[in-house]
Image: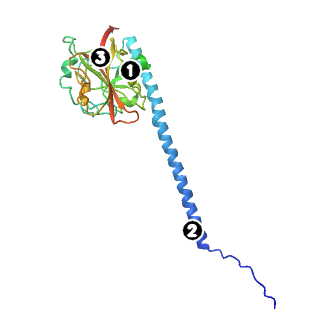
């Protein structure tokens, strides 16, 4: 008798197919989410590192041009000129507030208001309006030309690509310490390359009434954000011994973050007033 063997037909288990299909859908959805998140992060990086710089630099350039037109026409563009008086605290910002690129402004400034008017007799000019650009900072070595505004708030000053004047420190050309903060990265990053400044480099501050020329003298490569004495009337670090000054004078201080793309420490550049030229 012939025995006929039948080929076995594999049985498809529907449950296994459904589980595999579900796993594939989960993996596909996860991949889509990961790609989308990556694109969003990339766009955020582009916005922060490129677009904010582009916007802030253009706006800062327009502000500089507006200031110069106002000065040329004899108008009042830019607020109170040199601003001899100590500026009031406004817009909800408290004296001693610390921005991401500056130092704590509470230390070492108790005598600053007295020093701000020194060397100018009894003359007390009107203080610059809060957040108002009133001067232009020029650093030829860096090809830098940016507005200076009163205050160091991020939204009102620094994020516009301006250099911010620490409230309570001296105004340009006055006895004491004319202290400024600026972003190292993003939002115009005006102080990105101040680490390249060398002793003897010129730094000009232009106002409605005069041009003040400071000369770079010393650099403090790194200190803590709480080292507020670096912007005192007689600037001297309380964290890094040996950095700073002991005698009153006419000082300029520039502060920003270091290393780049962090706000862990502060970089400080000091200069001394060399000349003043009336407009």
Gap in Å between the C-alphas at discs 3 and 1?
20 Å
Q: Position of residue 94 (x, y in %)?
A: 25, 33
Q: Quadrant of residue 110?
A: top left
Gap in Å between the C-alphas at discs 2 and 1?
65 Å
Number of numbered tags placed on the structure image: 3
Determine crowd level at label 3: few under 14, some 14-19, many 20+ residues with C-alpha closer than 10 A: many
Instruction: Kindly identify which residue carries mark 2.
Output: 19
Identify which residue, 99 or 159, lies in the foreground. Answer: 99
Up-down relation of residue 170 to residue 155 (above or below)? above
Q: Earlier in the sequence, mark 3 or mark 1?
A: 3
Q: Secondary structure at mark 3?
A: loop
Q: Which mark is residue 197?
A: 1
Q: Earlier in the sequence, mark 2 or mark 1?
A: 2
Which quadrant does the C terminus fall into? top left
* C-beta proximity under 8 Å, tags 3 and 2: no
User: Residue at position x 55%, y 54% from top?
Assistant: 31
Gap in Å between the C-alphas at discs 3 and 2?
74 Å
* C-beta proximity under 8 Å, tags 2 and 1: no
Identify which residue, 126 or 119, lies in the foreground. Answer: 119
């Amino acid at each position: 008798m012939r025995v006929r063997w039948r080929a076995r037909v594999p049985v498809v288990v529907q449950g296994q197919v459904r589980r595999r299909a579900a796993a594939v859908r989960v993996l596909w959805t996860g991949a889509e989410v990961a790609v989308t998140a990556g694109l969003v992060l990339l766009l955020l990086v582009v916005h922060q590192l490129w677009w904010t710089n582009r916007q802030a630099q253009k706006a800062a350039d327009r502000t500089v041009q507006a200031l110069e037109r106002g000065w040329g026409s004899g108008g009042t563009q830019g607020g109170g000129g040199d601003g001899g008086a100590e500026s009031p605290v406004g817009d909800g910002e408290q004296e001693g507030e610390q921005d991401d690129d500056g130092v704590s402004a509470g230390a070492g400034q108790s005598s600053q208001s007295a020093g701000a008017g020194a060397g100018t007799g009894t003359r007390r000019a009107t203080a610059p309006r809060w957040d108002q650009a009133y001067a232009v900072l020029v650093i030829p070595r860096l090809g830098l030309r940016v507005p200076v505004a009163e205050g160091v708030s991020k939204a009102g000053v620094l994020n516009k690509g301006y250099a911010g004047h620490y409230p309570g420190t001296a105004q340009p050309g006055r006895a004491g310490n004319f202290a400024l903060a600026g972003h190292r990265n993003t939002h115009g990053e005006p102080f990105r390359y101040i680490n390249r400044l060398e002793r003897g480099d010129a730094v000009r501050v232009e106002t409605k009434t005069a041009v003040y020329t400071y000369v770079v003298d010393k650099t403090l490569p790194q200190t803590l954000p709480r080292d507020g004495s670096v912007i005192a009337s007689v600037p001297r670090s309380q964290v890094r011994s040996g950095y700073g000054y002991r005698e009153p004078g006419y000082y300029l201080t520039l502060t920003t973050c270091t290393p780049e793309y962090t706000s862990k420490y502060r970089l400080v550049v000091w200069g001394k007033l060399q000349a003043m030229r009336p407009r």
